[in-house]
Image (cartoon, grey):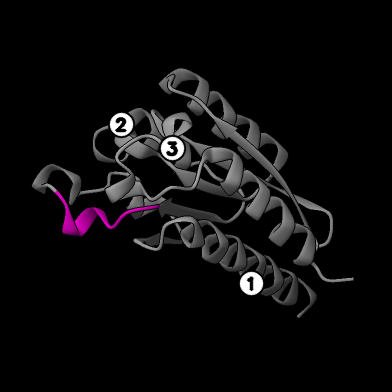
């Protein structure tokens, strides 16, 4: 059994992501949030992880989930959506993290409107995966699994 076995990963999603599949498919693709949840759950199981996918349009609720992750020492895959660009409250909560954090985006914000180029949360994340649609989430989960393995190895050393 791997070091990441049975670890729950919170896959948190910000505003408007419940509209995936119908929201600007030329930018975000045709996958729904349900499709992303199914893909994440399947891959998480393969990696020896449990996936808990959540979505909210409410900044306070998202921050509450981050606090939960901090208290439970749970890794997070986070698509902050529009909060990426201005939520210093979310960034400050994420700075207290106690486990791996990977920021994820379906589209590539750097190739979009100028206001999307800056992420206030990227500086407190282990890394960012962007521009690969649904596969961004899969790559982020693989990164979390690798980070957990590396942490376990360093604890054993």
Q: Which residue is mark 1?
A: 146
Magenta residue span: 106-112
Q: Closer to the N terminus: mark 2 or mark 3?
A: 3
Spot occupied by residue 35 in the image (x, y as percentages of width and height): 59, 46
Callout 2 secondary element: loop
Q: Earlier in the sequence, mark 1 or mark 2?
A: 2
* Image side of residue 16 versus residue 87, left or right: right
Q: How many tags in the picture?
A: 3
In percent of width and height, residue 8 lies at: 74, 47
User: Residue at 43% across / 30% down in the picture?
Assistant: 19
Mark 1 vs 2: CB contact within 8 A: no
Q: Which residue is mark 3?
A: 20
Towards the viewer: 157 or 54: 54
Q: Nearer the viewer, residue 91 or 156?
A: 91
Give how far across and how far down residue 107 sits, in percent.
32, 54
Q: Which mark is residue 87?
A: 2
For the residue labelled by badge 1, is the local secondary structure a helix, a strand or a loop? helix
How far is the residue under mark 2 from the one under mark 3?
22 Å
Q: Is residue 107 magenta?
A: yes
Q: CA distance from mark 1 to mark 3?
A: 28 Å
């Amino acid at each position: 059994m791997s070091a990441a076995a049975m670890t729950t990963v919170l896959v948190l999603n910000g505003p408007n992501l419940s509209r995936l599949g119908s929201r600007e498919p030329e930018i975000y693709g045709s996958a729904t949030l349900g499709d992303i949840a199914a893909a994440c759950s399947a891959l998480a199981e393969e990696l020896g992880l449990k996936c808990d996918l959540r979505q909210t349009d409410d900044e306070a609720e998202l921050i509450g989930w981050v606090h939960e992750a901090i208290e439970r020492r749970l890794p997070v895959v986070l698509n902050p959506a529009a909060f990426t660009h201005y939520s210093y409250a979310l960034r400050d909560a994420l700075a207290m993290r106690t486990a791996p954090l990977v920021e994820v985006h379906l589209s590539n914000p750097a190739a979009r409107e100028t206001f999307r180029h800056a992420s206030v949360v990227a500086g407190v994340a282990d890394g960012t995966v962007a521009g690969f649609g649904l596969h961004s989430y899969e790559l982020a989960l693989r990164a979390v699994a690798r980070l957990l393995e590396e942490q376990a190895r360093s604890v054993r050393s």
